[in-house]
Image: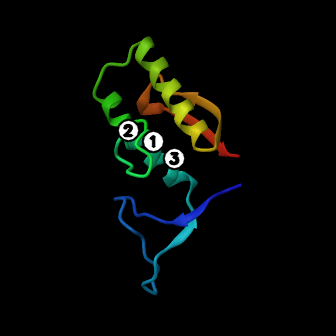
Amino acid sequence: MTATDLLLTVDYDLAFTEAGDLAAGESDGQHLALLLLTGPGEWRADPLVGVGLRRYQSAPLGPAETAALQREVNIQLTRDGYQVLENDLSDLSAAVLNAVRL
């Protein structure tokens, strides 16, 4: 099952069709990206949402930090209705994340 929502540009602005209407379409990819990039407290409707991946990008990732990040991603995605099929974030430049919406 895929989600349909308003689409965003690569800069996270609202996307528009050539006719000037708001663009809508399959949104699971952008939904996952927003969930990973935003941190707790950035979503007014649910202050617990968000992984805050940026804070992990600038810090050295040892085994404990990698495990904490993978656990947080699993919690956030499961909480948001996804089933995590694969989660390998040991190297953020070659991260592997595969999840499907239930």
Q: Is residue 90 above or below residue 4?
A: above
Q: Residues within 10 Å of mark 3 (few under 14, many from 20)?
A: some
Which sits earlier in the primary sequence, circle 3 or circle 2? 3
Looking at the image, do the residues carrying marks 3 and 2 touch, with CB atoms under 8 Å apart? no
Q: Quadrant of residue 47?
A: top left
* Quarter the N terminus occupies: bottom right
Total numbered badges shown on the rendered structure: 3
Q: Is residue 44 above or below residue 22?
A: above
Looking at the image, do the residues carrying marks 1 and 2 touch, with CB atoms under 8 Å apart? yes
Tell me which amino acid carries mark 1. Val
Q: Residues within 10 Å of mark 2 (few under 14, many from 20)?
A: some
Q: Position of residue 31 (x, y in %)?
A: 51, 52
Which residue is identified by label 1? 49
Which sits earlier in the primary sequence, circle 1 or circle 3? 3
Tell me which amino acid carries mark 2. Pro
Which residue is identified by label 3? 32
Which residue is identified by label 2? 40
Instruction: Specify the label residue 28 is tagged with.
Output: none
* In this rendering, position of residue 35 left or right of residue 4: left
Q: Position of residue 12 (x, y in %)?
A: 37, 59
Residue sticking out furthest to the bottom: 19
Residue sticking out furthest to the left: 58
Mark pair 3, 2: CA separation: 15 Å
Tell me which amino acid carries mark 3. Leu
Mark pair 1, 3: CA separation: 12 Å
